[in-house]
Amino acid sequence: MTARNTDTKEEIVRIGTALIKSHGYNAFSYADIAEKLQVRNAAIHYHFRGKEDLLSEIIDQYIESYTLLDKQLKAAGASATVVLEKFIERYSCLVDANSICIIGSIASDFNTLPESVKEKVKQLVGLVLKLVEQTLVAGKKTGEFTFSEVPKTQTLLVMTNLAAGVQLARITGKRDYDTIKKAIIRQLKKG
Amino acid sequence: MTARNTDTKEEIVRIGTALIKSHGYNAFSYADIAEKLQVRNAAIHYHFRGKEDLLSEIIDQYIESYTLLDKQLKAAGASATVVLEKFIERYSCLVDANSICIIGSIASDFNTLPESVKEKVKQLVGLVLKLVEQTLVAGKKTGEFTFSEVPKTQTLLVMTNLAAGVQLARITGKRDYDTIKKAIIRQLKKG
DNA sequence: ATAAATACTTACTATTTAGTAAGTATTCCC
DNA sequence: GGGAATACTTACTAAATAGTAAGTATTTAT
C-alpha cells in the first residue's frame, strides 16, 4: 500500500464532478466517492475538509478550464463556427453520458449552497456567457452568423437551449436534444 | 388538538412541491415538512409511506392540473397569445419566488429516482410539450404567430428557453430572464 | 352508544452522513 | 539516517434521515 498517491486528489475531483452531473450535488456523499476510489472516507476529508470545499474546488477548476479555453481560442484564431461546434459538442457528450451540465445541476441546488460557493458559480456562468457571446459576435463579423437579436440576447437563447436541452434529453430521449442542437445552428445562420 | 385535519395531506403536498422547486428533491427531508406543518415526522409517513410516494403524488397533481388546463383552454377558446402569456406567467412567478420549474428541478435528480416516478415525469413532460405545441399551432393558424421552425422544434426551443431561463435567473438575476422572455415572444412573431 | 375508521403522537431503531482524533507508512530533504 | 511532511488508515462520535410499531384522541356511521 503506497502512502503517497499523487493523483487521489484529482480523482476525487473527477468523481465528484461526475456525480454532480449525473446524480446532483445533494444526492451523493463522501462515502460514494470513497467506495469508487477504494479508499476510506477520512481520506476524502483529508483532501477536502467538507463537501462544500470539494464543490468549491470543482467550480474553480471549471473556471480555470474556461479561462484557458478562452485564451486558446483567441490565440488559435479558430473560426466562430468551429468554436461554437466544439462548445456544443461538450453538451452532446453530456447527453451521451446521461449527464447534465454542471451549471444546470448546481442551479437546482443553488439555494442550499453557502454564499462563497454561490459567488463562484456566478463567476463561472459569467465566464461561459462571455465566451459564447464573443464567439457569436466574432461569427457575425465574419458573416458566419446572421442572427438578428443583440448578441447578449442570442447568447442567452443559445445557452438556455443547450442547458435545458440536455436536461430534457434525460427525460424524453436524445432525439429532442438533437432537434434543439440543429435548430440552434440554423437560427444563428438565418436569424 | 384536533385528531382529524382534512387538509394536512394537501399541505404536505404543497410544502413538498415548494421545497422541490426551491431546494431540490434530494435537499429536503420529512423533518423539514414536519417542522413547517407543526406536526411530528410520523404524521408525514402516515400520509405518504416514503418520500418517493410523496414525489409521485406531487407529479400526479401536476399531471392533473395540466390536463385540466388543457381542457379549459380548449373549452374557453382563448387566443393562442393569451394562453402562451398565461403559460409564461407561471415561469415569471417562479423567478419571483426564487424557484425553478419542477421539471427542471427533477431533471437534475432524475437518475436517483425509481423507474415508476421516472415514467410519471415523462408523462408530465409529454403533456406540457403537447400543450405548448398545440398553442403554437393554433396561434400560427390564426396568424398570431409566424415562426418558421416546425411546431415541435419551436416548442422545444420555447420550453428550454423558459426552463433554463428560470434557472439562470437564480444565478445571474431576473434581468436575464426578462430578456429571454421578451425574445421568446419576439421570435414567435417574426421567426 | 359504540365500533370502526381516521389522523395523528410517542417512542423507538437502523442506517447514513459528516466529521474528528490519533496513529501509521512512505517519501522527501538536509 | 533522522526529522518533517505527506497521504493515508483505524476508530470513533454526533447528528440527521428514514422508517416502524403501538398507542391515543376524535370523528363517522350504524
Image: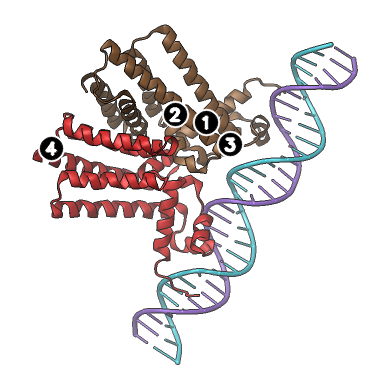
Chain colours: A brown, B red, C cyan, D purple
Does the residue at mark 3 contact the one at mark 2 (Cβ under 8 Å)? no
User: Would you name the residue on which mark 3 appears?
Assistant: A52
Per the image, label 2 sits on a secondary structure element best described as helix
Circle 4 marks a residue in which chain?
B
User: Would you name the residue on which mark 4 appears?
Assistant: B140
Amino acid type at mark 2: Val
**Residue located at (40% from left, 66% from top):** B7
Q: Residue furthest left?
A: B142
Amino acid type at mark 1: Lys
Using the image, determine if residue B39 lies above or below residue B158: below
The Cα atoms of the two marked residues, 1 and 4, are separated by: 43 Å
Of label 3 and label 2, which has the lower sequence position? 3
**Residue located at (42% from left, 55% from top):** B54
Instruction: Tell which tag, 1 or 3, sits nearer the viewer.
Output: 1
The Cα atoms of the two marked residues, 1 and 3, are separated by: 12 Å
Instruction: Name the side, left or right, on which B119 lies relative to B172.
Output: left
**Residue located at (36% from left, 43% from top):** B103
Q: Could you say which quadrant of the image residue B115 lies in?
A: top left
Per the image, label 3 sits on a secondary structure element best described as helix
User: Would you name the residue on which mark 1 appears?
Assistant: A120
**Percent position of residue A154, x then y:** 30, 26
